[in-house]
């Protein structure tokens, strides 16, 4: 099972979830980091101080840029971006962390996440 944990207070994260819902062909389940499921994963893997999206992929946990690039493997027409794995993780994570630190400052229009009944079944509590 693929589960993507995200900050549900973050516009960038919510837009990313909308992007995946439209393109991932049902590959992912989603959970807010603050949800019961999200907190279970965070505590079980000692990720309390991680400010990152978290991908749980077949019992393996990935964070930061690695989580994003591994998630893109499941998005047709976007898989080619996984070539960015060739960039050293330390450099990728510097960019990721910069965006993460400033994500609440990005000029984005607030938009509610409207889900179809089918999409709602993909969200874990």
Image (cartoon, grey):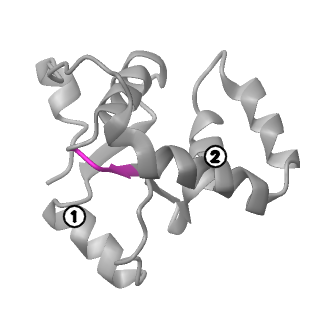
How many numbered marks have been drawn onto this rendered protein structure?
2
Disc 2: which residue: 70
Whole-percent x and y of residue 82? Answer: 75, 37
Percent of width and height locating residue 76? 62, 20
Q: Is residue 29 left or right of residue 86?
A: left
Residue 36 located left or right of residue 93: left
Q: Is residue 1 left or right of residue 108?
A: right
Kindly identify the residue that appears in the image at 41 percent across and 62 percent down. Answer: 51
Comes first in the chain, label 1 or label 2: 1
**Would you say residue 5 sits in the magenta stretch?**
yes
Q: How far, Cα to Cα, is label 1 from label 2? A: 21 Å
Residue at the image position 77 percent from the left and 25 percent from the top: 80
Kindly check if marks 1 and 2 are in contact, taking CB atoms under 8 A apart as contact. no
Image: 67 above or below 29? below
User: Is label 2 in a helix, a strand or a loop?
Assistant: helix
- Measuring 52% from the left and 67% from the top, which residue is drawn there? 61
Q: Nearer the viewer, residue 40 or 49?
A: 49
Where does label 1 land, which residue?
37
Q: Quadrant of the C terminus?
A: bottom left
Task: Please rate how many residues cluster around mark 1, counting C-alpha atoms within 10 Å: few if below 14, some from 14 to 19, many from 20.
Answer: some
Judge whether residue 67 can be spotted in this image: no
| Range of magenta residues | 4-8
Height in image: 6 above or below 45? above
Rendered position, 57 above or below 9: below
Q: Is residue 78 visible?
A: yes
Please state if 13 lies on the left or on the right of 90 as rendered: left
Q: Residue at x 18, y 35 (%)?
A: 121
Q: Is residue 24 above or below residue 31?
A: above
**65 part of magenta stretch:** no
């Amino acid at each position: 099972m693929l589960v993507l944990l995200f900050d549900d207070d973050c516009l960038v994260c919510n837009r990313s979830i909308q992007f995946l819902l439209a393109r991932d062909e049902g590959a992912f389940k989603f959970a807010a980091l603050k949800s019961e499921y999200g907190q279970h994963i965070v505590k079980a893997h000692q990720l309390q101080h991680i400010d990152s999206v978290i991908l749980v992929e077949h019992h393996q946990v990935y964070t930061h840029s690695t989580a994003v690039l591994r998630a893109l493997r499941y998005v047709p027409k976007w898989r080619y971006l996984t070539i960015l794995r060739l960039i050293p993780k330390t450099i990728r994570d510097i960019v990721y962390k910069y965006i993460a630190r400033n994500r609440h400052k990005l000029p984005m229009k607030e938009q509610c996440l409207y889900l179809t009944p089918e999409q709602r079944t993909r969200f874990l509590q």
